[in-house]
Amino acid sequence: MIHSAAEKGFGRGARDYEAGRPSYPVAAVDLIVAEFEIGPSTFVVDVGAGTGKFTRLLVPTGARLLAVEPVAEMRAVFSEAVPGVEIVEGTGESLPLGDGSVDVVTAAQSFHWVDPVRGAAECHRVLRQGGGVALLWNSRDTTIGFTRRIKELMDRVAGTAPRYASEHDDDWKDAFANHGGFTALQVRQFRLDHPTSLDATLARVSSTSYVSAMDDAARAAVLDEVRTILDEEGVGETFTEPYVTEVFWCRKR
């Protein structure tokens, strides 16, 4: 079942997601590829693939790739952005795959939408023995003035929508630890400097599920506040937005 905030927000904001969201650091992708020896003989399933921001970075490995995404509008944009990679409907709690059929499961900017206990169990079910899980998130670097202020704005308007680094951000870690079928989670952090612009940053904010799901007036008010922040911080029409990328990984025992 798709969370209502994701279904409405990402349905409306799919093209904003493609236009405004950052990619992922090359070093983070290299870590995952090296750790799990991803290559032409590897079957990788990217869960909650969205518009393929992460999936496309695995194409050069030659791996067999399958994207899983519950929101139809996101799947449509994915098919345009990442031609040649199959994408199917599904969720992290119910993957359309057989037992032990997958070498690596990835989830970039998406696992906070998954019920953690069911999601961990589903990863374990579809993975072969020794197969790997890699979970990634980009978070704004709040040591910078304008990113800190945008983060504070987003915190204020988020409501109850699932988010990474929320008060429940340990739930999924506990689910993998308590399952008993995985090695201990490992973690690495990477810096990501995302070249962007005023329009792209507005698209980035608009692509957030709870902003995209707002009525037109409320959404416009949030975007006006972002414009004010950027103007007051003097960042200009084009600038770099800093992120911290966290990568977590483990293997099926």
Image: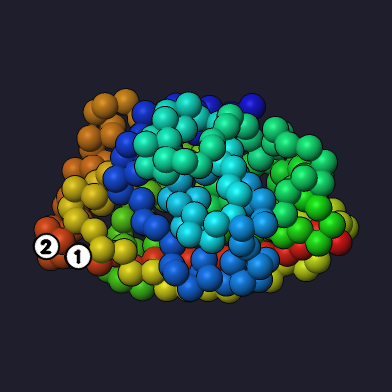
Is residue 162 something one can see in this rendering? no
Between 145 and 101, the one nearer to me in the picture: 101
* Amino acid residing under circle 2: Gly
Residue pictured at 33% horizontal, 69% vertical: 193
Secondary structure state at the residue bearing disc 2: loop
Q: Quadrant of residue 14?
A: top left
Residue 93 on image: x %, y %:
71, 37
Dot 1 falls on a residue whose secondary structure is strand
- The residues bearing labels 2 and 1 have C-alpha atoms spaced at a distance of 7 Å
Q: Residue 190, can we see it?
A: yes
Quadrant in the picture for the N terminus = top right
Q: Amino acid at mark 1?
A: Phe
Q: Residue at x 53, y 27 (%)?
A: 4
Which residue position is annotated with label 1? 239
- Badge number at residue 236: 2
Question: Quadrant where the C terminus lies?
Answer: bottom right
Residue appearing at x 82%, y 41% in the figure: 99
Residue contact at pointers 2 and 1, CB within 8 angstroms? yes
> Where in the figure is residue 110, as x and y percent of width and height?
55, 47
Position in image of residue 237 (x %, y %): 12, 58
- The answer to which of 81 and 233 lies nearer the viewer is 81
